[in-house]
Every structure is written in structure tokens, then in C-alpha cells.
Image (cartoon, helix red, strand yellow):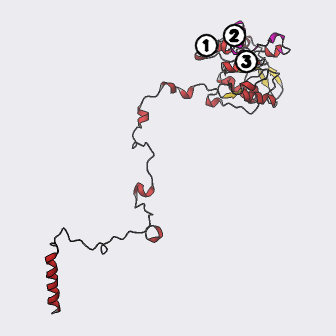
Amino acid sequence: MASSKGAEKALELLKYLPRVNKYNVFPNREEFSRKIRKRGQHGGGTHGHGNKGSKQRCSYPRVGFEGYQTPFYLKMPSERYFAHFRGRRQYPPLSLGQLQLMIDTGRIDASQPIDLNMICNTKLYSIDPLDRHFGVHLTDEGADGFTAKVNIEVQHAKETVIAAIERSGGVITTTYYDIDSVKALINPQKFFETGKPIPLRKLPPEDTVAYYVDPKSRGYLADPEKIADERLALAQKYGYELPDISKDPEFEMLTTRKDPRQVFLGLEPGWVVNLADKVILKPTDDIWKKYYGSS
């Protein structure tokens, strides 16, 4: 009786329920739920990185990698600005503020002509010929506080730097040194120990001749009379009174110059400095005298 009543009740429910079909019958979701494998000590061994491959090793290529093909930036032609960049002459900067500090602290003697050798001997400024360094680029940082009266020789300087030095009663000259002369100047002791004669300083290359013959840049190949005119014109431009060097008690020091083919001040090309015996050997053959004495 109980079974028949249950069947009757089930049939009675089917009268009011919608028809059972494959679209309204669903499995028990809790019964067939997927168990997620835990990480690390809880059951996993790869910490979520899978097995093998770049996902496990994290060996992803760098940004911009093009699959061992020639990169896009190498396929395009280079800009002309960067042409022969590694072979260009470099001039590490030295500011007027640093130069004034070297003079105030006694690293540089302002009563003597200042050149590349004296600046490098301070151990506060260094250049490396292997990096194509050809000398000093004097910058105008600290020009307002520069008061030293100097006779300085640098390789490159702007108009404001020239004005700051000449306003204080000093003199500046821009000169060119080839790479062999630079090596000898920055470390004279090492050069003299080689036993080689002092070389002739080479003339400037073609692309720098215009700069070193220009009186506005105080080039060492410029006409001295034109340099005097440019000194006066620069003083009028910046509004300062140009000191008269001819009446200065240090006139001899301020007018001391190297020969265009001379490397060391006071030492002529062709001389050999013997540090062991403390003597200077001079050439006696007429051929060598003519070679090292040519201008």
C-alpha cells in the first residue's frame, strides 16, 4: 500500500511539474566538483610553474627580442650625428669654479703659466688618452666668483670663460695637442723613463684649424695684434674695464708662450731627459737639429 501511494503521489506531482528533458536536468554539482592541487608542501612540487619549458624556468626573452633576427633598430640607417662617434676627440670639462678652488688650496701655482701638465698634477682632474681625451674644456660654471690672475693654456673655451679670465687681468690661450703629446704631458715621469726624445707637437688637423687661428677663441695660431683688438671688443661687449697687461708687474709671466711645436715649457723638442743621472741630452747632429728645429 505504501509503495502504491508513493507512486500515485509521484504521478500526481508530474501533472503540475514541467516536462523532464535534457535541458532542465542537471547533475549534482557538489558531487562532481574538481579538487585543486595545492602548492608547495601541500602537494605541489613546481609552485605553480608547471613542468619544463620557459614558464617553469622563467627564461622569457628580453623586451624587444625578435627571435634571433636582426633587430629593427639595426636595420635602419644610423643618424649622421653619430658617424665616427667613437673616433671623435673628447675634451673633459673643467669649470672656472674648480680652477679657482685649485688655486686657493695651493694645488696650482697661479704665479706660473698653467697648462695641461699642471692641471693633471693636481690629481683632481684626469684624462685618459685611450678614451680619446685630447685636453681640457674650460667651462663658465663659477665665472662670477673667479678672481685669479692666471696665464692659462687650454684646448677649448667659450666666450664667457675668456671674458671672466681677462676681466681679472689674466690671459688665456687655446692650443691643440696631438695624442702623443697628451700622453707625455699628463705623466712626464713615465715618458722620460722611456728614454725617448721629446716629440714635436703636431699641427692641428684640418677640422680644427679654423678654431685655433681665430683671434676670438684666442687661438695659439692667431695674429697677436688681432687678439689685442678682440680683447678690447670683448671688454666693451660685457661692460668691464680691460686691465693693461703691459703695466702689470707680472707682465713677463702673463706673456710667456710655448712654441707651436713645443710640448713642455722650458724643454725643447728632441731633448732627452735622463732622470737617473739628472742630465738633459741635446742632439748634436745637424740633421736632428734641423728636424726638431723646424717650425
In this view, the mark in front (3 or 2) = 2
Q: Which residue is mark 1?
A: 210
Spot occupied by residue 256 in the image (x, y as percentages of width and height): 78, 15
Is the residue 231 above or below the residue 155 in the image?
above
Please state if 4 lies on the left or on the right of 49 as rendered.
Answer: left
Question: In terms of sequence position, does the residue under pointer 1 or pointer 2 come before the other?
Answer: 1
Spot occupied by residue 249 in the image (x, y as percentages of width and height): 86, 14
Is the residue 140 above or below the residue 52 in the image?
above
Q: Secondary structure at mark 3?
A: strand
Q: Quadrant of the N terminus?
A: bottom left
Q: Quadrant of residue 106?
A: top right
Q: Quadrant of the C terminus?
A: top right
Q: Amino acid at mark 1?
A: Ala
Please identify the residue farthest to the top as the structure is shown.
Answer: 225
Q: Secondary structure at mark 1?
A: helix
Q: Secondary structure at mark 2?
A: helix
Please identify the residue farthest to the front as the structure is shown.
Answer: 16
Please state if 276 lies on the left or on the right of 199 as rendered.
Answer: right
Q: Residues within 10 Å of mark 1 (few under 14, many from 20)?
A: some
Q: Which residue is mark 3?
A: 172
Span highlighted in magenta in the image: 222-250
Spot occupied by residue 191 in the image (x, y as percentages of width and height): 73, 27
How far apart are the two marked residues, 1 and 2, measured between alpha carbons?
20 Å
